[in-house]
Image (cartoon, rainbow, N blue to C red):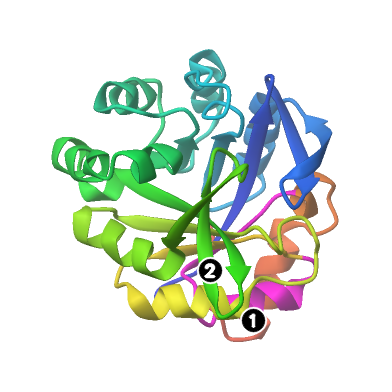
Amino acid sequence: MLTKRIIPCLDVKDGRVVKGINFINLIDAGDPVECAKIYSDLNADELVFLDITASSDNRKTIIDVVRNTAKKVFIPFTVGGGIRTTSDMREILQAGADKISINSSAIKNPDLINEGAKMFGNQCIVVAIDAKREGNSFKVYINGGRVRTDIDAIEWAKEAEKRGAGEILLTSMDKDGTKSGYDVELTKRVCEAVNIPVIASGGAGKMEDFSEILEYADAALAASLFHFKEIEINDLKDFLESKNIPVRRV
């Protein structure tokens, strides 16, 4: 079995790390550059940096923050938010990111996935999916969860893979910030539908939530639990190893 990854997420608004519940009621959680360095030092496997209002504000990601963060981080680093073109992708990658994450722009222009994969390689292209349950299905939302689409999340994950995405970042909007556990059904359905790695996001509240979701997902992402030191990454890895879940060690 491949080792599972633990990934802190830095949601950034107006140059500060923030965290909310169900994508709203945001509270300050620190400076993104300093948070990133701390996580790099604390044995996180990767980082995800999301400029959460870039798309809704119709602006680009804050490049200076990305560049300064990349200087202090020595683990793989994904950046998303406001990336609309392959030129934007190149700018982010040249600023020091290892991967780029696209969400709203991929929905509006699916060919962007193909173009990015061809130009920079599949391994650089992460398609982020924000999904909310509607009965027995899950619908995709864009613009930081503000706009509903009619697109089915599982079908969209399959299309993203066909177009060249190297990874799916799957967030349950229903679970986001609730600490009630990841959405196992959503994650399991997407994992079974694609053959590329899936990062599960939204709902982590205790160590058992990670062990549960990592039966299906390749990686587990969390924010507030790590930001406010409710769970330490090394302690979490010790717990996962005790459950026979392989994790990375430096």
Give the residue displayed 84% in from the left and 46% down from the top: 228
Measure how far apart labels 2 and 1 are at the Cα level. Answer: 20 Å
Which secondary structure lies at badge 2? strand
Asked if residue 220 is among those painted magenta in the image, a careful observer would answer yes
Foreground tag (2 vs 1): 2
Q: Quadrant of the N terminus?
A: bottom left
Q: Position of residue 128 (x, y in %)?
A: 46, 50
Residue 184 visible to the viewer: yes
Is 50 above or below relative to 42?
above
Q: Residues within 10 Å of mark 1 (few under 14, many from 20)?
A: some
Q: In the figure, is residue 181 to the left or right of 139?
A: right
Q: Residues within 10 Å of mark 2 (few under 14, many from 20)?
A: some
Is 50 above or below relative to 92?
below
Work out whether residue 157 or residue 206 is closer to the camera in this orientation and state it: 157
Is 86 above or below relative to 106?
above
Q: Amino acid at mark 1?
A: Glu
Q: In the figure, is residue 61 to the left or right of 6?
A: left
* Residue behind mark 1: 212
* Residue behind mark 2: 138
**Residue farthest along the left direction in this orientation:** 118
Give the residue displayed 31% in from the left and 45% down from the top: 125
Q: Which residues lie in the magenta part?
A: 205-223
